[in-house]
Image: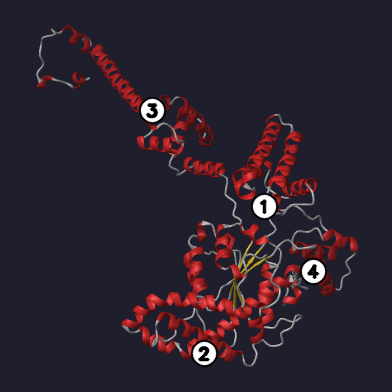
Amino acid sequence: MEVKRKRIPWTEKYRPRFLDEVVLKRTQRTYLLSWWRCWKVWWTHRNTWENEEQEAWFAWTSKEAGREWAKEHVDDWQKFFKKKFGKWMGNVRNKSKTSGSYCYPPEPQQELFVGESKTRYTTDLSTNAITKIKKWLEDTWEEFREKSSANAVPMPPLPSYDPLLLVGPPGNGKTATAFALSGEVGVPLVELNASDERSKAKIKRRMGRIIRSSSLRRSKKSTEPLRLVLFDEVDGMHGTKDRGGFSELLRQLKHARFPVILTANDKDDNNVRKLMAKFYSTTIFFDRPQPYQIEKLIDIIAKKVDMGVPTEVREQLKGTQDLRTVVQALENYYYSGEVPQLRKDKMRGFKSALKKCFAFKQDGIAESLQKNQERIRSVEGKNLWDFIIWSWENASKLVETKHLYSFYEDLAYADYIYQLGQRRRAWRVAYSASRDLAYAMGKWGEEKTNIWALRKLKLRFPSAFSSYSRRKKFLSSGGQLHPIVERLAQKQHISLKASIRDMNMLTFLGERSPRELGGLLAGLNVDSEEVDRLTTEYTLEKGKVMEGYEAGLKELRTTREERKKSSIRNRNDKEKTKGGKKPKHEEENQKPKDETINDKDRKLDDFF
């Protein structure tokens, strides 16, 4: 019986094995290999320290004086070393320039590596490189020792070099680049997948074992790191299972003995922004592919499978927004002769589109308006209201101060048209509001030509959304105001979801008649602490609400006492009627008013 083999997807079968097979810009390739060169030089420094300084350092720190000196000066030494090392290796970017301003390795790296040319970027150390590297390390330590007056102190441990951060939309070659670098330099890659649990304990155990441990016997003989470590999708570390994982990741990176590559999809994620700020000089951005890059990828795949790709198919694929989709479409075309329907303009990030609407100008206002409308339509899962509320919240960051009033005026008109169309279900009117919004952003937005400055700009989450989500959390199960929602639902015999909606009416009553709200809360048997939370959350007049609440409680107590008396009288009447006697309250009315009753003769009814 013939066994059918499962077909391997082309995204796996033709995954790049070397950097020449990856569609990279020249700047991306340069930064990538420059980072690896820095790690090779750092590896030589580390071997030098372990062979020549480690034993003396441990002996020094075994003494009280050595431990005291280490507490005071080791951090300063490591900061000093990292700063000097970055300048020496030329891997310090100028923040005033864009990411495309740097495209050739700096001179210090050219002196240490062999076979350097503009067409070939090698990572092999030259014959005299080891001597130069050791000499630089000795000079750097002497400079610090003179600065800190530490004449008889051995060299402390060296800090780890920075990881490589690859940031960009999914499907554009970040993970493939890491595997291609591994094949290019001949070092195995260890991958920590995004599907794995990445809590604090898991990262401390798994990643600590991978990036901090090594065979000293092998590492001292090797001239380059023994492994590469890939940590995929750092921006996905937000779930309950990943609690504490990001902070532990930063601690592990501080002491990493092997080069680590981090990938992220969302550059606006808080964790990613922290990494971008911390590892600025080793961050590489992967943007949407240009048509010439897609053309190059088509040629690479077509050559591997010996397939001809017609011009009309190439033109159709040039509008694709990620490289993975191109490979999948070519695979489908190879087996079926047809290109699947592709989503071309529906994959742009919301925040990225919003920034570009304000910052990127066209030749004229008409062209800017048309381009902004395309950007607004290109975002999935967001409507025009999202653009309006985010623009209102972040206008001070995207518009010059002198134009703020004019922008808000146009924004208010766009909002009015949009709300008018929604109320009347006139969707053409609501759609026309996008023209007004696109015009306002294109005309009054502050132009920015520095791509890095635009990427670094952090947009503020709309306060209206944050307050709504916070209140929803308070009102939901387990929230601080959930008991009020529960009692309101029980009182009206409605669902909890409907009761949450009715909270708006409750707070409206509190704004108009706070005493009436207090009386209503008393009738719902709400605790005073819950009343305090409600007034604080919705900024109601606490004094008046509490007055109504206390009055309502007093009235409830009086009503309950009267009901108790009435029920006791009714019970006594029934008992006396059965025995042929008069009801007790009639007998009490017939007694003389001046007659006194001894405490011993008193019964329970006398107290009510």
Residue at the (61%, 67%) spot, across then down:
232
Q: Which residue is mark 3?
A: 544
User: Residue 349: x percent and y percent?
Assistant: 68, 54
Q: Mark 1, mark 2: which one is toward the viewer?
A: 1
Q: Farthest residue to the front: give it.
A: 402
Question: Which amino acid type is shown beneath numbered disc 2?
Answer: Arg
Instruction: Characterize the local packing of mark 4: few (<14), some (14-19) or many (20 or more) Cα atoms within 10 angstroms.
Output: some
- The CA distance from mark 4 to mark 3 is 71 Å
Question: Which amino acid type is shown beneath numbered disc 3?
Answer: Lys
- 600 vs 195, left or right, is left
Quadrant occupied by the N terminus: bottom right
| Nearer the observer, 199 or 416 | 416
Residue at the (58%, 80%) spot, across then down:
88
User: Residue 36: x percent and y percent?
Assistant: 63, 78
Question: Tag 2 or tag 1, which sits nearer the N-term?
Answer: 2
Question: Tag 3 or tag 4, which sits nearer the N-term?
Answer: 4
Residue 9 occupies which quadrant of the picture? bottom right
Q: Is residue 266 above or below residue 110?
A: above
Q: Which residue is mark 1?
A: 355
Residue at the (52%, 34%) spot, across then down:
495
Q: Which residue is mark 4?
A: 297
- 567 vs 361, left or right, is left
Question: Tag 4 or tag 2, which sits nearer the N-term?
Answer: 2
Q: Secondary structure at mark 1?
A: helix
